[in-house]
Amino acid sequence: MNKKPKKKEGIARLMELAGTKRSGLTGACILSVLSSVCKIVPYFTIYRILKKLIQCYSAGDSFTFSEVSTLVIVTAVSAVLYGIFAYASAMLSHGAAFDILYELRMELMEKMGRISSGYYTANTQGGIKKLLLEDVEQIEIFIAHSMCEVAAAVATPLLTIIVLFMVDWRLAIVSLLPILCSFVILAMALKKPDGARLQKAMAEAKAKMEGTVIEYIHGMSVIKIFGGTGNAFKRYRTDLNSFTETVRETAYYNANGMGLYYAFFGAQVLFLLPAAIVMLGHAASYAQVLPKILFFLVICAGLKEPLENMMNVSVDSTKINVGLKRIDELLAEPEIELVGSGKELTAFDISFENVSFAYPGSGTNACDHVSFRLHQGSCNALVGPSGGGKSTVAQLLLHFYEVDEGQIKIGGVDIKEVTHSELVSKIAYVFQDPFVFHDTIENNIRMGNETATFEEVRAAAEAANIHETIQALPEGYQTVVSDDGGLSGGEKQRISIARAMLKNAPIIVLDEATAYADAENEAKIQEAFSRLSKGKTVIMIAHRLKTIQNSDNILVMESGRLKAAGRHDELMESCELYRDMVTANERRDNWTMGKETEHDEA
Ligand code: ADP
């Protein structure tokens, strides 16, 4: 059963995530409250000492230390206890934060392994990275620091107010008046209807801008090759402008309310002084009133800090709310593994029956009432203009997305009834832009079959035409490579073919690479492709038509629709789109050859 997250928010949701580690957090909060008590006690004892001093001075009495020794000891002990409680609280909260976040990170990583691969194509790399790194980190900071501050921020002012009323209720009311006013102003400012919308818009604009920056940096090499720097930069600039605009709008929106709030919040002295003057005027003796006034002046300055903490904590908790929401969204993603009822695939013909699909949020069908049948062991090609729906067909076959209409069957079994692991074990997908992990070449190939021996890895590399290249490296199969270093695009493609060889799946989906155009690499890749495809049901997403002319079946796709299907000769007769594409391809090939001949003759 798919776990449905309850709709809790903020600290309540955090406590839910904390699970068994909740007691550590509660302990940290209690210690934090105790440290607040110890922080306030010295104010009170110092007031009592001061009162004694002034009374003795005005009465002309002599003052001995023994009269205040208990108060001095209490002051010193509470200062020491404050340090001990604050330290213990920080230790406990940090420990709990690391434990909670460790479990949350593990849960997220495990979840990511179980959800549909469509999630990764639909969400930018930047967004996922932000969720796993920044959102989780922000929660870590909140639990380690702010949770205890919440406890202290509530306890300290409450205790202080009690002490104030114990000393003098009239001055207590006067010094609380500006704070009450500032809270009323703040509440009115927060109640304005657009506040929450602007906060949300600002967080979203920031996330979008950061996602674009990361994508821009990641894709820089591709952007440069295809000369798209201007376009990509334009996207970044648009996102940056929209972020700046929301920041400005939020700042203007909050300016009046926040200005007034801060003006009142720190105005205790302005309220206290006139009250003090009135009190002094009516006092029987200065010695009675003066210590109280001094006490209020000192303590009111100290009251500001915990109240400000409370404000910061409430801002922090709205910040983590956005991150928590994103985490909950990921945790709520349907788990593809659980979709199937567990049927096994034993035959490998593929049929699409009236399949329609539109990407989430897109109004138009990327796959529009498509029907075809591919026989087991046949070699098939998907051709058509860019954006025609070829990759979508391949992704639907891999169950990256649920179809909106129709059925996709392998060997007569609807793929909805097959578990994800069964499906991916029967299909090898060679991506156009294959990924190489930061590991040895041997382990990179072994990903196709974890139990393969070194001999099998080597045989797969030989069949994929990459063995000699690997041998030429100083550390051979033990050479550590990574996606952005060590191997050319064509070499990475052949590593990924070797993986697929090792997997030995009965269905192969090949996304033909176009970027690695040098003739030697291309010939090697083609040879490796044809070895890999032998005896398998093959779907090849073809960009160059020369390579697929001998296919058993060619499917021509345009605007999500299947325009025609058949062998090369049949399509040349019956399908104008196919004929035009072949002519355009031939013209391009001749032009390229002409350039090469010219070059050779020169
Ligand atoms: P092809 O492989 O033939 O170039 P695709 O299957 O990639 O075509 O795309 C078909 C249509 O679906 C296009 O209009 C494309 O813009 C859209 N599309 C592709 N991938 C996504 C996606 N992840 N989200 C939204 N739309 C997409």
Image: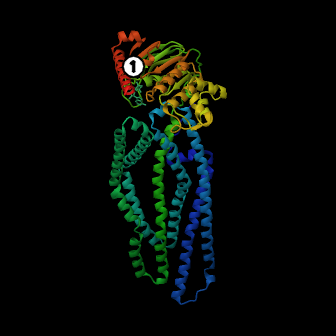
Q: Residue shown at 63%/82% (left/top)?
A: 66
Q: Residue shown at 57%/43% (left/top)?
A: 104
Q: Does residue 586 appear left or right of residue 307 in this picture? A: left
How many marks are shown on the rendered structure? 1
Give the image's coloring scheme: rainbow
Hey, which quadrant is residue 564 in on the image?
top left
Q: Residue shown at 60%/25% (left/top)?
A: 460
Looking at the image, which is closer to me, 526 or 592? 592
Can residue 23 be seen at all in this image of the molecule? Answer: yes
Looking at the image, which is closer to me, 155 or 82? 82
Mark 1 is on which residue type?
A: Met
Percent coordinates x, y for residue 478 in the rendering: 62, 36
Q: Does residue 91 appear left or right of residue 233 in this picture? A: right
Percent coordinates x, y for residue 406 in the rendering: 45, 18
Q: Residue shown at 52%/55% (left/top)?
A: 146
Residue sitting at the far bottom = 60
Mark 1 within 8 Å of ligand 1, using the beta carbon: yes
Percent coordinates x, y for residue 257 in the rendering: 35, 58
Quadrant, the N terminus: top right
Which residue bears the numbered disc 1?
A: 557
Can residue 451 be seen at all in this image of the molecule? Answer: no
Looking at the image, which is closer to me, 325 or 299? 325
Percent coordinates x, y for residue 216 in the rendering: 41, 41
Q: Is residue 392 above or below residue 484?
A: above
Callout 1: SS? strand
Hey, which quadrant is residue 507 in on the image?
top right
Looking at the image, which is closer to me, 417 or 239? 239
Q: Quadrant of ligand 1?
A: top left
